Every structure is written in C-alpha cells, then in structure tokens.
Amino acid sequence: MSIPEPSPPIPASVRGLWPTLLAGGAGAGGLVALGFSDQAGPGAAVLAAALVLAITVAGISGLRRAANAPAAADPPVPPTGTAPEPYAALVNALPDPMLVVAALEPDDVTGRRFMFANQAARELLRIQRPSGLLLTIVRDPLVLEAADEALFGDINAEAVFQIGGAQERTFRVLARPLGEGREGVRLALLVFREETEHLRVERTRADFLANASHELRTPLASLTGFIETLRGHAREDAGARDRFLAIMQAQAERMSRLIDDLLSLSRIELNEHVAPAERVDLAQTVGEVVEALTPLAREREVEIEAVLPKRGEASVVGDRDQIIQVVQNLVDNAIKYSAKGGVVRLGLEAGLSSEAAATSGAADLARFSLLTPDRGGGRYVALRVSDCGPGLAREHLPRLTERFYRVEGQKSGERSGTGLGLAIVKHVMNRHRGGLAVESRVGAGSTFTAYFPEATREAVDPPPPAIESKLS
C-alpha cells in the first residue's frame, strides 16, 4: 500500500538497487566501526580497510551505472526489516543502528526518506515500515542537519541524539555521503553510536573527584590551622596544646577512614562484574559481626538484638570478606543513628522471593528499592537491620547510596562519617547479584534490607574429586 507524500517519489531504478546500495552502506558502516575501534591491530586494520573500501567503491559504481540506465518497473518492495542476501544479514548483524537515507531537493525538508534500516535501527527507532519519511522516525534538528551535510555537501558530519524515557540514552550520529543516483537523488548513511555509558562514567568520575577533594580538604584545612596555632601563641599553653592535638588526631583518623573507604570502593568496583561463587554461612557471619560491634554499642548505650537461624540454615553465594563489610556498615550506621537507650534489631529470613525479601512488611514506612537483582527468579536470604533513630524523609531515600551523600543536619557531630558506607554496600550487593532496600519515616527509624542469592549445594559445592587407583 502506498501513502501519498508531499515530495516526488524516489525513482524505481534507485529503489531496485538494494544489493549495491547495501554493499556501499555495509562498507561505510564497517569503516566507521573500524575507525572507532581500538582493539584491532595494524595489520587487521589495513586488511579490513582495503576490503571495506573495495565493497564501497563497487556499491557506488553500481549505483551510478544504474542511475544512467533506462528506468525500469518498480521491483517488489521487500518485507519490513529485510533486504536481499547476502548483504542483509551482514548489515543486520552490525550492533550499531544504521539508516540509508535519500533526498532530491535541498530545500524540501519533507523529502528526506529512509530507504533501509538495519535490525538495531528498527528496534531503537521503532520502525515498522521498510521505508518512509525520515521525519517520522527522527525529528532532532541536529541529526537532520548532519544528514543534509552528508546528502548535499558530500562531507562527513556528526550530531548528538538523545532519547528520553525512564533511562535516557545518548547517541553520536555519524553521517556519511554515499554519492548521487539517477535524477539527482542523493544518498547518505547514518550510523548511531551509543555513548550513554561513556557519559555516565565521565560524570561519575567528575563528581567523584569533586566530592573526594572536598572531603579531604576539610580535615587538611583543620590540621593546617591547628599546626600554625601550636607553632604560634599556643606553643606554651599546655591545655590548648592537648586540646588541639586531640582534634588533630580525630581529623587524621577521619582522613584515614576516608582513604580506606575510597580504596575499598575502588577494589570492589574493579571486580564488580565477576560474581562470587563461595558458600557463606550468613547466620554465622552476622553473629561474628554482632560480637565485634557489641563494645561499640555499649559505649553508645545502644542494645543489639539479633534473631538468627541456626548455623547452616541461611547459606548464601558470596564473598565472606565483602559480606562482613555489608553487615558492619549497616549495623554501624544503625548504632550511630540510634539514640541512647535505643535498640538495633537484626534478623535473617531464608527462602524468600526477591519481592518478599525487599520488604519487611511494615505498612507505615515509606519503602524504596536502592538495588534490584537482574534475575527475577531464585530464592534469597534477607538480612534486615532496624534502628530507632530519627528516620528519613521520603525525598532522601533515592540518594542514600550516592557517594558522599549525607542527609542535611546529620553531617557533623557524633554522626559524622565518610559518606561512602552505603555506596560500598550497594556495590557489594551488585557484585553478589543481590538487592538492597530501605524503609523509613521521620520519627519512626529506618530498616535496611540486604538480600543475597541463597546457596544450593548443586550450584556451589564442587564435584567430588576422582578416586585414583594405585597399583603396587
């Protein structure tokens, strides 16, 4: 079925050149991909470039010969998302979205058409037809301008293209000219290279450096000021000297904790993509951490109540040292934010679904999932740590695992910290393919839940070693 368009249709002789057109498109796309790759060696790069150049020249030459041939009847329109072999499989296999676009007149904006879209482009731009107006799938003026520069200026052009939604994605669009066909039809190739992850990492790096330098500058400025004071008028004042030295020691310890947390976070991120495969008895591990932190709780006049299953009844897949970090950080935070005479409660539940593990069932608390496992199935062991502190307003919950983020009014005094504890917890849980959730309300305390994949004997225990027979 044909739909009337405001611009003249693309000639049939051009639409019938799918093999040659796709040859040029595949060659240009491969050359663009090779230009952005830093993995190929010099020899491979030269060989690939020669092959791509040969294919591209052949495609353009065929297009120009066909442009001067007599017009033929329109060939059958290929089904949506297909093109004649052998080029369709090649172009559709490319991971980057690619479009072949055509136009007749520079001033006719509505005359820009896409003649082919590979599989990645159809998924990204939700293309349902084999060809149509370019404006129906891309309306970004910068992308359209780049396409015009390639179509009518015969120059390479670039543009940044963003797709909104729950997860915003950013692409760099590379426009490459493919030459001229019959009756002045111009052709160009658009390649979409995703830069979402690169930009996210760059923003994270910039924020991290800014926050880390700020956190380190404060204790350094304090140390410098007290040193100058001790070298000056307080040199002979024993009382002031002792007081200043105590403050300097506290600031030095704060810097030491900050550096330790930064190094710990860096080590966790380095291996975050490698899931652990050890069997860890979570009940035993939590019990050991509670024993270690009991003196700190007594010092702050806070009681710890732990309800744990028997050993062996709550085994998880994980890294024991990192699990200890998670438990220590959660319990330490609960002790820190509990008032004198308060109670910190710990509990373990095994055999839960991911949905059941993420909530404690308290109806009067606001809940937010800080990390959700990628896999939906499986069983989990949930560790819940509750405090009787001041609680958190709903607007603070999504930002709790940001590096150096601390709720306003809780950044100083006895509750001061590095601001990296929950960030470490989140990265550890991500490595363990687990989840992290928080439930809180102002004046009602907070409950943090970290849930780990439950261990199964088949999944974790190695097969028994083979028995070797020895002949005497």
Image (cartoon, rainbow, N blue to C red):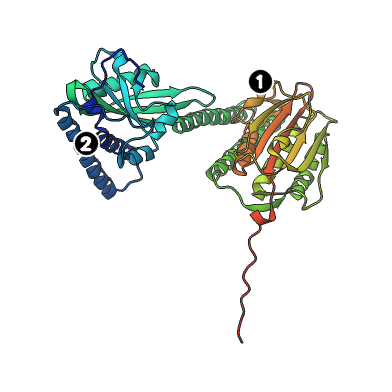
Q: Quadrant of the C terminus?
A: bottom right
- In which image quadrant can residue 257 be found? top right
* Residue neighbourhood size for the residue with mark 1, other residues' Cα within 10 Å, grouped as few (<14), some (14–19), many (≥20): few
Q: Quadrant of the N terminus?
A: top left
Is 14 situated left or right of 302 in this image?
Answer: left
**Disc assigned to residue 59:** 2
**Disc assigned to residue 192:** none
**Disc assigned to residue 395:** 1
Q: Which kind of residue does numbered mark 1 sit on? A: Glu
Is 131 situated left or right of 179 in this image?
Answer: right
Is 5 located above or below residue 291 in the figure? above
Are the residues flagged by discs 1 and 2 in contact, CB closer than 8 Å? Answer: no
Kindly tell me whether residue 408 is visible in this rendering.
no
Q: Residue furthest bottom?
A: 472
Query: Disc 1 on helix, strand or loop?
Result: helix
Q: Residue at x 62, y 79 (%)?
A: 469
Q: Residue at x 24, y 35 (%)?
A: 20
Q: Which kind of residue does numbered mark 2 sit on? A: Gly
